[in-house]
Image (cartoon, helix red, strand yellow):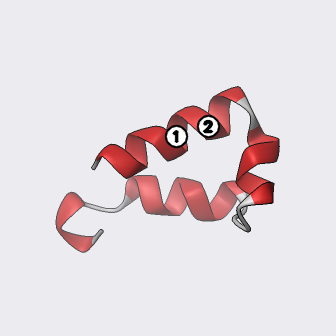
Amino acid sequence: MRLRCELEQKLKDDPHLIDDIGLTGRRVEAEIAKPFWQA
């Protein structure tokens, strides 16, 4: 759950970091939207 919060914050604050770790904004949003038991 903490990872999702961190990803969401990075997506908002600095989307270039998301690109640097090899994810897309859409992928991050999909991960954030998942129920916690599917993480």
Relative depth, front residue between 31 and 1: 1
Amino acid type shown at disc 2: Lys
Q: Are marks 2 and 1 in contact (CB under 8 Å)?
A: yes
In terms of secondary structure, where does tag 1 sit? Answer: helix
Callout 2: SS: helix
Q: Which residue: 30% across, 68% down?
A: 39
Circle 2 residue: 10
Query: Is residue 33 or residue 12 the one in the foreground?
Result: 12
For the residue pair 10 and 29, the one nearer the viewer reads as 10
Is residue 10 rendered to the left or right of residue 3?
right
Residue closest to the far left: 37
> Farthest bottom residue?
38
**Residue 16's spot in the image, x, y percent?**
82, 44
Q: Which mark is residue 29?
A: none
Which residue of the protein is positioned furthest toward the top in this rendering?
A: 13
| Residue 27 point in image, percent of width and height | 61, 65
Q: Residues under labels 2 and 1: Cα distance? A: 5 Å
Q: Residues within 10 Å of mark 1 (few under 14, many from 20)?
A: some
Residue 36 at x, y percent in the picture:
22, 59
Q: In which quarter of the image is residue 22?
A: bottom right
Residue 5 location, x and y as percent?
Answer: 40, 39
The residue depicted at 72 percent of the width and 62 percent of the height is 24
Residue tagged by mark 1? 8
Q: Categorize mark 2 by other alpha carbons within 10 Å: few (<14), some (14-19), many (20+).
A: some
Q: In screen coordinates, is 34 left or right of 24?
A: left
Residue at 70%, 54% in the rendered image: 25
